[in-house]
């Protein structure tokens, strides 16, 4: 069982930066693939980026070059550095974990979810 807690969300102006954190319980967190998803009001939850235990990453096209995912297994934490934020990045951001090596892009690929953190980008 893995419990995930996101933090770091907030209000930022367009062009600004935020760093989200996903802190996990469990001593084997480093074995998990972790994904970040987001959900804007009235829209479906969408995949943003994922990282597996080999540190392979996969980004959705709209965030490439702006967002960076990383992990610190000693701290049981995955980070999402978000730069050059746009109003369309406004959403609740969720981290999720799965036990497999593959970086799934569907919500159903993940077994464990955090409660989400709000990111609001003003224009």
Image (cartoon, rainbow, N blue to C red):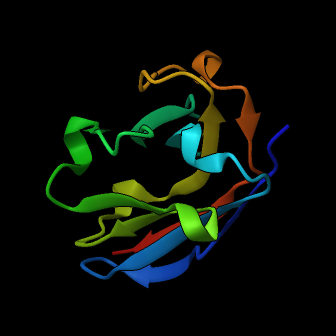
Q: Is residue 14 above or below residue 70?
A: below
Residue under the image location 62 percent in, 26 percent down = 99
Number of marks drawn: 0
Q: Would residue 3 be found to the left or right of residue 45 on screen?
A: right
Quadrant where the image shows the C terminus: bottom left
Q: Residue at x 21, y 62 (%)?
A: 66
Describe residue 49's horizontal placement relative to residue 22 as left or right: left
Q: Where 117 falls versus 46 (above or below)? A: below
Residue 78 percent location from the top left of the image: 52, 60
Q: Is residue 64 left or right of residue 21?
A: left
> Is 54 left, or right, of 112 in this rendering?
left
Residue 89: x %, y % from top left: 39, 56
Query: In front: 65, or 89?
Result: 65
The quarter of the rendered structure image containing the N terminus is: top right
Residue 41 in view = yes
Q: Residue furthest left?
A: 65
> Between residues 86 and 113, which one lies in front from this camera angle?
113
> Percent position (x, y) of residue 57?
29, 41
Q: Which residue is located at x 53 percent, y 41 percent?
A: 34
The x and y percentages for residue 40 are: 55, 45
Q: Is residue 106 placed above or below 23 in the rendered structure? A: above
Q: Is residue 38 visible?
A: no
Residue pictured at 14% horizontal, 57% vertical: 65
């Amino acid at each position: 069982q893995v419990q995930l807690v996101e933090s770091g969300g907030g209000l930022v102006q367009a062009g600004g930066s935020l760093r989200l954190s996903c802190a996990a319980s469990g001593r084997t967190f480093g074995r998990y693939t972790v994904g970040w998803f987001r959900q804007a009001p009235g829209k479906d939850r969408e995949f943003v980026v994922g990282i597996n235990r080999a540190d392979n990453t996969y980004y959705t096209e709209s965030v490439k070059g702006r967002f960076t995912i990383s992990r610190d297994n000693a701290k049981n934490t995955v980070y999402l550095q978000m730069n050059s934020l746009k109003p369309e990045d406004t959403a609740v951001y969720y981290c999720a974990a799965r036990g497999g090596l593959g970086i799934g892009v569907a919500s159903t690929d993940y077994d464990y979810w955090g409660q989400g953190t709000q990111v609001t980008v003003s224009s």
